Image (tube, helix red, strand yellow):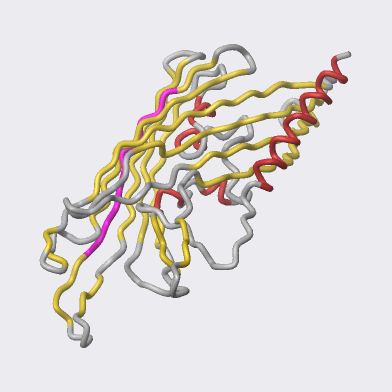
Amino acid sequence: MKMFIIKNKMKKILSLIIYLLLSQYIYAQNLNTITTAVPFLMLNPNAQSMGIADIGVVAASEYYESGLTQNPALLSRNEKIIGFKFSYKPWLRQLVPDINMIDANFYYAFSKKITLGYSYNLYSQGDISLTDKNGNVIGQIRPKEFYHNLKYAQSLNTNLSIGLGLKYIVSDLTNNIFINGQPTHAGKAIAADIGLDYRKEIAKKETSFWRYDIGASILNMGNKIKYTDSAQGDFIPMLISLGNMWTYNKNLNPNLKYCIDLAYQCEKLLVPTPQHYTNNQGHVITYN
């Protein structure tokens, strides 16, 4: 009976994953690119999840840092933990010499049920020369973007945990210069994250077991970003993610074990697609 229930659950999960994947394919005659502000929010600073194809909405039991990036629920797993990290990453160094990312984070479990985390991420785009229509240099700027990120996670029982997050985002692309006679300023936004994680061990034996993990999150739910007072603003990259991980754990002796992880993750950008219309003259008009 238990195996029948598990199979039914997995069929429902697989059906949902297939639906989300198919919904991402849009057939159109014209290329219709979706753009957002602060795309650096999509850059993953977590080296561990980058090493497994950026999968981070689910994670192995030993890895908590994905709770600060892709699913806040992963920070709480009925254990008392503490961790911190500081990293510096030269970005696209073979193309541009002065683009870099800085990431610092800290998380601490006040009890086996509740964990708090904080991270700071900075994306510096180096020096950029501004030119007029004739190619003459008229100025130089140094764009940078960063966010402060606070996370809260709680275990509801031995298998289920939830998480919430809050980001304060600053995008300074123009260094307050005038563009086309208009003053500019840094764009700012406040965004929320929410996540869910369910994991359970099955087929337990004396020295081995299987574990399945299902995770889901919605990231960057926030306001539009504007760089001038008269602009309409641009959407930030709100993202929904769903993932599943199967883990086989085998204890070889009291001091040695090995694990095999098999994981899949799908994502969908929750940003409106620009609408294209063709007028009577055959010209394509785009509305955001």
Q: Is residue 283 left or right of residue 257?
A: left
Image location (x, y in percent) of residue 79:
54, 18
Using the rendered image of the protein, determine whether residue 206 is visible from the camera's viewpoint.
no
Image location (x, y in percent) of residue 36:
40, 53
Q: Nearer the viewer, residue 186 or 235?
A: 235
Instruction: Identify the residue at horizontal 61%, vertical 35% (top origin).
Output: 58
In the rendered view of the protein, which quadrant contains the N terminus? top right
In the rendered view of the protein, which quadrant contains the C terminus? bottom left
Indicate the quadrant where residue 109 lies: top left
Image location (x, y in percent) of residue 203:
84, 22
156 within the magenta span: no
Identify whether 40 is placed above or below 270. below
Q: Main secondary structure of the magenta part?
A: strand
Q: Nearer the viewer, residue 32 or 82?
A: 32
Direction front: furthest residue? 280
Q: Is residue 138 left or right of residue 13?
A: left
Instruction: Identify the residue at horizontal 60%, vertical 18% (top origin).
Output: 160
Instruction: Identify the residue at horizontal 69%, vertical 41% (top origin).
Output: 19
Identify whether 75 is placed above or below 26. above
Using the rendered image of the protein, determine whether residue 116 is visible from the camera's viewpoint.
yes
Indicate the quadrant where residue 259 lies: top right
Instruction: Identify the residue at horizontal 52%, vertical 26% (top origin).
Output: 73
Image location (x, y in percent) of residue 95:
42, 74
Q: Is residue 165 left or right of residue 201?
A: left
The span picked out in magenta is 142-152
